[in-house]
Image (tube, grey):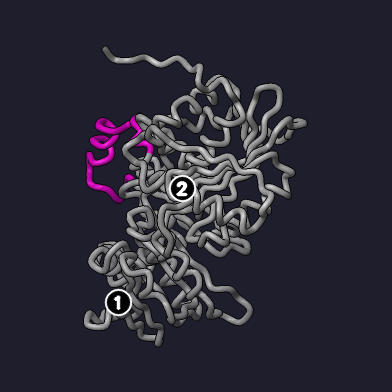
Amino acid sequence: MEELWEKLPGWDRAQFLRLWSFWAAEHQHAPVGEWLVWLVLGGRGAGKTRTGAEWIVQQVKSGARHIALVGSTFTEAREVMLEGESGLLNIGHPSERPKFIASRQRLEWPNGAVGHLYSAHDPDGLRGAQFDAAWADEFCAWKKPEDTLSNLRLALRLSPRAGEVPRLVVTTTPRPTLALVALKSAARVVTHRMRTRDNARHLAPGYLSAMEDRYGGSPLGQQELEGEILTDLPGALWSQATLAKQRTPDTPELERIVVAIDPPATSGPNADACGLIVAGVSDGKAYVLEDATLQNAPPEIWANRAVKLFHDYQADCVIAEGNQGGEMVEAVLRQVDPQLPINRVHARRSKQTRAEPIAHLYTRGQVFHVGRFDLLEAQMCQMGSKEQRGSPDRVDALVWAIHALVKDTTNVPRVRCL
């Protein structure tokens, strides 16, 4: 290798140093196969920005002409995705680099390809646009991740080359958010994980050792250096280890089945989700059968869904929390099925306080999940921690269901401070 390097003239050396396909690590190469989203989870300084930028460069060279570039804000998108050392304005041969038209938040490549910058603070900014490739950066820092990602994916409707589907690369330092868990578990999403140490040769001397001395082995280090989704959070009522032990592929013959609803307090695009959980009981143990939670659903939609679940599972009753317009909830359900057996419950304590005895039942091996419920379990593993965001709608419906099925939850010992 050294002999070959010495024989190369200066221009060839420069070209060789820009040969990304040679220098990139294995996890920085795009996956093969029929994927739609390439999710790159990386620690700080792991090279995820360069990975995303180089993928865009390759798409432009291969025929893509309409590119979406989405950051957490316009400032972050410009400073990292464009102007950073690994940004689009600073990689590749100078003659092939794009120009940035700041007044239009637009990139223009010499071959005619065009890129547009978008902010995750404004999901509606993506409406009406259409693209054949996209790069989304620092997804876990987005203010409105679900809405922005949904609009972005709907805009990916142009074919970059005949017979090919438009694709998206998402680069982010992972955080245990519901949006990330949902994306990671979606169909045709391929995930690559990048550790900070894998990119050590491109970092300042002493940086890695200093960071590992400070954060190595800690939950923050697991997230920021190892590129792992941190699911066991300090203060959380549930852990992934506990939930993993309580999964089962089989459902026993159930003695009783309930459908539990945690209705949203408001309606509209910014409303909380309507928690819908189906669970049953056998020999004193509860089994979670389905998480059918609905997002942004008006009352008639979630009511129809709840009644359908009741009949599909041949359930015994529907449990509905009555704190938020209890009579209205019952009335909406009865409009769908006048004979529906409804048990209205009223919360006198906080959601976390109600969840604590149910979490204890999991540790005692009295509650099982029939399969995986990624969004529900992510919310469970945030409950009680500083990472908890928004209303724990799925967990609250779960709590009502388990409480109704396993009657000895009231006997869980508690310690009072005197």
State which tag comes first along the sequence, 2 or 1.
1
- Please, what is the three-letter code of the amino acid marked with disc 2? Arg
- The image quadrant that residue 229 belongs to is top left
Quadrant of res 52: bottom left
Residue under label 2, please give it: 193
**Which residue is at a point 30% across and 76% down the rendered structure image?**
94
> Could you classify mark 2 by the number of other residues whose Cα lies within 10 Å: few (under 14), some (14-19), or many (20 or more)?
some
Q: Position of residue 248 (x, y in %)?
A: 67, 32
Q: Which range of residues does the magenta coloring cover?
A: 200-222
> Residue 168 vs residue 318: left or right?
left
Q: Is residue 204 visible?
A: yes
Q: Position of residue 174 (x, y in %)?
A: 39, 47
Local SS, label 1: helix
Give how far across and how far down residue 134 sits, in percent: 44, 70
| Residue 218 among those drawn in magenta | yes
Residue behind mark 1: 94
In screen coordinates, is 145 left or right of 338? left
- Could you tell me the amino acid type at mark 1? Pro
Q: Residue furthest top?
A: 418
